[in-house]
Amino acid sequence: MDYLNLANSPAIFFACLIPVGIIVFQAVKLIAMSYKQGLSIGMKREDLNKCIRTAASISILPALSLVTLMIALAPSIGVFFSWLRLSNIGAGAYETLAAGIAASAAGVELSSLGNATNLMTVYITMNLGMIVGTIVVLVSLKSYDKTLRKQRKSNPFLLVATSAMFLGILARLTMPYVLNGRWLAPFRMENQRMILPFFAVITGALVMAICQLASKKAKIFQDFSLTFSIIGGIVVCIVASVLLPR
Amino acid sequence: MSNDPKPNKDSVFTEYDLKVHRIGRWTMLLATLASFLPIAISVLFFGAEIDLKAVGMAFTGVFMMFGINGFIEPFAFAPILGAGATYIAFTTGNVSQTKVPCVVSSQKIMGVEMGTPEGDVVATLATGVCSLVTTLEVAIGMIFVNVIYGFLQSPLVKPGFDNILPAVLGAVSVLFISKMPKVGFVPYALYGVFLFIMGKSFDERSYGIYCMLVLIVITVGFAYFMRKRSAEKAKSQ
């Protein structure tokens, strides 16, 4: 059987459907448990429903980038495994890189794997490559959570430290986009598009700041602030890419 | 669901917490094992073979690039997400790109603090919903591949959709800097200057995760210093 016929066969579809089903079950079960827990600690039902609506609206646009990646991977490794990988543990950038590394270890191009053995090399590598995080969570999360809870009780600074920790993570993730092209891009005709991530960061930040100010007058700016920021970033990048010379 | 701690060795946990860990662990383990089903079926029923040498080489390469992230990220994100959301986030992936911004924004909208019981409830709801939306959306993308591909890859809209993550990070940064303005600017300014000198490619090599660790230590240290200083000021007044 040709390797792409195998990758797109009903058997592989059902084999991918099972882990995706477990993922859906996990999310639904934990949502139901935390909803009940929210009610039991005095949170209002309408607030919890609002949280679900807001999270859904925030998630739609970022998930589109995963759709693009799935579509990019599908011609090489099949539609169903791409779907599984982007639903299961991994990250957008990781999946393509891991698949590319596996293909080159097998001595072929990702776009033409040639046979089922090379396809298996790619599948196994993509699954195994991110397994460290899973093992760390499975082995240590409970005891780590226990330590954090004990510390929070005895040391109130830990709540502040959690926010400070997150700021450190955010700065590391954000600043490379801000410095994309080191602001020199506008002066280098051939690299003008390198500045688009910078525009996206600044637009996202500005729209969020405006929404925070406007939320005192209208609740919609509070509830959809991240969605508006993302849309703002997308629109500015589209406009900039049209205006900037290629 | 009872909120009282159980009188056992895990007494710091409530009955709900213990159940979250139990369900989270089992579903995560099952999902991970089941993700190897397509490989098992290909080998057992379709005669596909496994080239162990190629797998070993490829795994070593991938592990060198991403292994350290796998060790560090759960410890960095668990205090922010709480246990329930961490299980979902590390089963479904895309933690910093989709799950964390969704959690942080939802917590801000709901007016709850991360690390509190209310914050953990909101984080679990937000991460679970985010995971369901992503799975559904990728499934829809799989069904309507021709229409969606044409739209997302068109030269007009592609630059916009390629830059969703920076827009999300810019927005979430404002949320957090406004929450802790004095502390917030420190890691951004430091890393900005550092990358300006060293070049952005420094972060793209595998040094980025170490930079994140250093930034976490500096930011937490600075927050501690500011807190201590304001406590001393309040005392002297």
Image: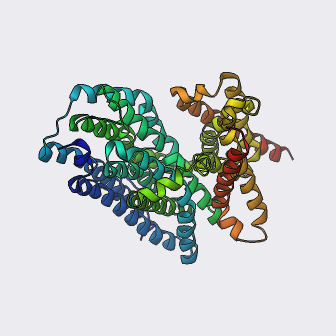
In this view, the residue in front, B15 or B127, is: B127
Determine the image quadrant of residue B212: top right
Q: In x, y percent, where is residue B86? A: 45, 51
Determine the image quadrant of residue B166: top right
- Residue for point 67% across, 48% down: A237
Left or right relative to B178: residue A138 = left
Q: In x, y percent, where is residue B170? A: 67, 47
In this view, the residue in front, B19 or B100, is: B100
Color scheme of the displayed model: rainbow
Left or right relative to B205: residue A122 = left
- Residue for point 67% across, 31% down: A191
| Screen quadrant of the C terminus of chain A | top right
Residue lying at the far right in this picture: please name it: B237
In this view, the residue in front, A237 or A87, is: A237
User: From the viewer's perspective, is residue B32 above or below residue B197?
Assistant: below
Tag count: 0
Q: In x, y percent, where is residue B175? A: 69, 53
In this view, the residue in front, B14 or A103, is: A103
User: From the viewer's perspective, is residue B143 above or below residue A95?
Assistant: below
Residue lying at the far top in this picture: please name it: B198
- Residue for point 27% across, 38% down: A119
- Can the viewer see residue A60 in this picture? yes
| Screen quadrant of the N terminus of chain A | top left
- Can the viewer see residue B191 in this picture? no
Q: In x, y percent, where is residue B201? A: 59, 26
